[in-house]
Structure formats: C-alpha cells, structure tokens
Amino acid sequence: MTTDLWMLIWSALLCVSLPVVYLMGRSGVPGGLAWGFGNRDTPLAVPAWTARAERAHANLVENLAPFAILVLVAHVAGKANATTALGAEVFFWGRVAHAAVYTAGIVYLRTALFFVGTAGELMILMQLFL
C-alpha cells in the first residue's frame, strides 16, 4: 500500500479518535455523564479546551473529505508519486499538530498549521495536473 493511502488511514484514525479528547472534558464536569447519556437539550458548561477540541475535530471532519478525494483520485489515476506521498504526510502531521495546538488554545500557530495541512493537499492536487 502506498504512503498516500497509509496517511489517509492515519488521518481517518485521527478523526475517529479526537472525540475521546473532548469526551474526557465533558465527562469531567459535574453532570457531564448524565448530559452525555441524555437528550442534550441544554448546553453543558465545559472547560474552554474541551470546546476547542470539539471545534478542532469538526475542522478535521470538514477537511478530511477533500483530502481523501485527492489521495484516492491520485491513486486511481496512477499519479501517486513521491510528491503526493510527501503531501499526504504534510497533511497528516499538520492536522495532528493543528488538533493539539487548537486544543491548547495557541491562536496564531493554529492558523499556520491549518495552512500546513492545506499545503499538503495542494501538493497532491498539483500532481493530478502533471
């Protein structure tokens, strides 16, 4: 299996594991477990890092589909190469760092890391047109 596909798998695993971070934050507040098992009709007051982790996850969900499309099209079209592999690695590690920095609340670095992930996607996209 190619590096591109492995990075897609690792990105999917990151996406399904990020909720564990904010679920820990939710379960740690009074009434959090009852709220989680309930209908969630009212908002739950959580620490700021918990809400940021949830937003980091939502941001990854939004960006995972375009990344997956680029990786899969490059693979099917026979365009996967060292540049697409590097682009996939840049995307994955950029998203790992983005999630950590976003959860920690480091604002400017968070934005820079978002663009690192985007740069990885652009590396793959460029190879589709060569």
Image (spheres, helix red, strand yellow):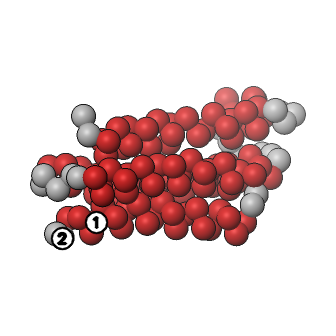
In three-dimensional space, the C-alpha distance between marks 1 and 2, rounded to whole angstroms, equals 7 Å
37 and 12: which one is in front?
12
Residue 83 place in picture, x, y as percent: 30, 57
* Residue pictured at 53% horizontal, 54% vertical: 94
* Three-letter residue code for mark 2: Phe
Badge 2: few (under 14), some or many (20 or more) residues near its Cα, within 10 Å? Answer: few
Q: Secondary structure at mark 1?
A: helix
Q: In the image, what residue occupies the spot 13% across and 52% down? A: 78
Question: Where, quadrant-wise, is the C terminus in this rendering?
Answer: bottom left
Q: Secondary structure at mark 2?
A: loop
**Residue under the image location 67 percent in, 37 percent down:** 21
| Residue in view at x 35 percent, y 38 percent | 6
Mark 1 surroundings within 10 Å by alpha-carbon count, few (fewer than 14), some (14 through 19), many (20 or more): some
Amino acid type shown at disc 1: Leu
| Spot occupied by residue 23 in the image (x, y as percentages of width and height) | 68, 35
**Above or below 20: residue 128:** below
Residue under numbered circle 1: 125
The number of discs equals 2
Q: Are marks 1 and 2 in contact (CB under 8 Å)?
A: yes
Please provide percent x and percent y for residue 92: 46, 49
Q: x and y percent of residue 85 in the render?
A: 32, 50
In the image, farthest residue toward the left: 77
- Does the image show residue 68? no
> Which residue position is annotated with label 2?
129
Between 23 and 91, the one lying in front of the other is: 91
Q: Is 100 displayed left or right of 72 in the figure?
A: right
Circle on res. 83: none
Residue 9 in view of the camera: yes
Does 127 sit left or right of 88 as displayed?
A: left
In the picture provided, is 102 more to the left or to the right than 74?
A: right
Front residue of 39 and 120: 120
